Image (spheres, coloured by chain):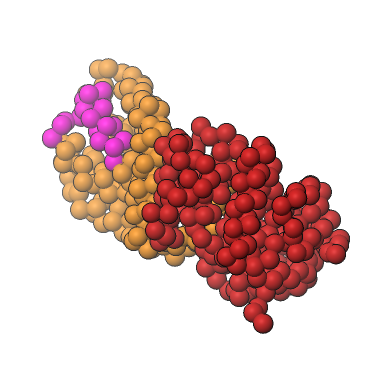
Amino acid sequence: MSSPAVALDDAVVTRGGFPLLAGVSLRIDRGTLVALRGANGAGKTSVLRLISGLERLRSGAGEVLGIDLLKGDRRELRRRVGWMGHDGSFYEDLTVRENLEFAARALRRPLSDIDSALDTVGLAHRYSTPARQLSAGQRRRMALGWIIVRRPELWLLDEPHAALDQSARDLVDELILDALGVGVTVVISAHDDLGPRLAPQKVVTLSGGRIAGSP
Amino acid sequence: MIRVAWLVAMKDLRIEMRSRVLLWQVVPFAVLSLVLAGLALGPEKAGSSSSAPGLFYLVVLFVALAVVQRSRGLESTPGTRASVATLGLDPAGVFLGKSLALTLELWVLGVTLLGGSVLFLHIALVGALKALPNVAVTLGVMATAGTLYGALTTGGDGPVTLLPLLTLPAFVPLLVAGERSLSAALYGGPLWEWWVIVVVALVAYAAVGIAVYGVLEES
C-alpha cells in the first residue's frame, strides 16, 4: 500500500504567538479528492498552507508526499504542489503568457505546454494581457493555467469556485476531474457544497483551528 | 543558482520596462533632487563647490532607497509571495537575480545623475568619466545590500518604513567611500583605497546574501 499523500498528526501552526492550527490530525490518500469545510477563520487556508510547505509546523508531526514537514526540505515540497490562493496574485506587470513562462522556466517544464494550458483555461485570446488587467474570474483561470503548466502531484485549491460564473465553475470542476483521473491528489477548501460533479472521498470540517468532524 | 539568478533578473527587468516606473517616476525625482541640490548651494557656488560629490551621493541614496523599495514590492503581496514560493526557487539565485536587476537599474540612474551633475552642479566631464567605474561598483554594493535588507524588512510583514531605517546605516560607509572616490576623480587624489572599501563591501554583502537570503525569506 502506498504512503498517504498527506499525514498530519496533532499538527500545530502558530503565527505571532496565535495558534492558526491547534492540533490537526488528518490523512489524505493519494489520488483522492478531499474537501475542507468550515467558517471564516476555521483554519482551512492554514491547513492548505501547511500542506504546501508555506507554513512551518510548530509541533506535532506531518508528512506530505513523503517529505517530513519538520525535518524535510520544504522547498522541494513546494515544487511538487500546485497552489491556488484566494486572490490568484501574480506579477501584475507581466502578461498572462509571461507569468506562465516564468513558472515553466523555474520548474524546467516544457514551454510548449503553455499554449495548450492557455487553451484549456480559456485564456488563449488574453495571452498578451498584463495580469493587472484581468478580471477576478480570469485571474482564477490564469492560476489554473499556472498549475497545469507546473504539473504538480498535489493540488491545493483555496476556495476555487469563489468569484466564478457557472462556466468557469464547470471548467474548474472539469480540470479537477481530469487531474484526479491521472492520479493527482486534490484538496479543496470551500464554504459551500462542491456541487454535483465533484464527490469528495472525504469531507473534513474545521472549527477554531481543529477538526470538528470528518464523516 | 546562476539559472535562477538569470531568470529572476530578466523577470524584474521586464517588469521594469513594462511599468516604466524607473523612467517616469524615479529618474524625474532624481533629476529634480539634483537641481534642488544645485539651488541649495546657490548658483555662484555650485560650480566651484567641493560639496558636489556629497550631493551626488545623497541623491543617489534617496533614489536607491526608492528603487530597492520598488524591487521588494514586486514580491511582497501575500498572493504573489505564496504563488512564487511554491516554485521552490533557489534563494541564493533569487538574491543574485534581484541584486543584478537592481544594479542595472541603479546604473541607469547613476549615469543619468552623473550627467545631471555635469549640467547642474558643473562638475568636470572628464572627472565624471574617470569616476564612472567606481560609481558603478558602489551602486552594485548598494543594490546588493538593498536586496538583503529588503528581504529582512518585508519577509516578516515588516512595515515599509523599516527599510530606510535599516538600510541607511549600511549605506554610510559606501556613501563616504563613494564621495571620497568621486572627489579624488574630480579634484585629484588617491583612488585605490576607496576601491578596496567598495570591492570588499561588494564581496561581503554578496556572500552574506547568498548564505542567509533563504533564511530571511522564510522568517
Identify the residue at image location x=65%, y=70%.
A30
Q: Reply yes or no: does residue B113 show up in magenta.
A: yes
Letter of the chain in red: A
Is any part of residue B102 visible from this angle? no
Q: Residue at x 63, y 55 (%)?
A: A176
Q: Hey, which quadrant is residue B120 in on the image?
A: top left
Q: Is residue A154 left or right of residue A192?
A: left
Residue closest to the eye, B132 or A160? A160
Main secondary structure along the magenta-highlighted residues: helix
Which residues make up the magenta segment? Answer: B107-126
Give above or below for B193 relative to A25.
above
Residue A97 makes an appearance in the image: yes
Q: Point out residue A58 in the picture as x, y percentages from the top left corner.
A: 70, 67
Q: Quadrant of residue B54?
A: top left
Who is closer to the viewer here, A19 or A118? A118
B156 or A97: which is nearer to us?
A97
Q: Is residue B118 left or right of residue B138?
A: left
Tell me what residue is drawn at x 60 percent, y 36 percent. A136
Q: Is residue B77 above or below residue A181?
A: above
For residue B158, side relative to residue B40 (left or right) = right
In the image, residue B109 above or below residue A71: above
From the top left corner, tell me how far across and down residue A77 is, in percent. Answer: 56, 67
Percent position (x, y) of residue A41? 78, 49
Q: Which residue extends farthest left?
A: B126
**Magenta highlight on residue B117:** yes
Q: Position of residue A100 (x, y in %)?
A: 45, 49
Q: Which part of the image, by quadrant, shows the C terminus of chain A?
A: bottom right
Q: Which residue is pictured at 32% across the width and 22% down the height?
A: B35
In the rendered image of the structure, the colour used to display chain B is orange
Outermost top residue: B43
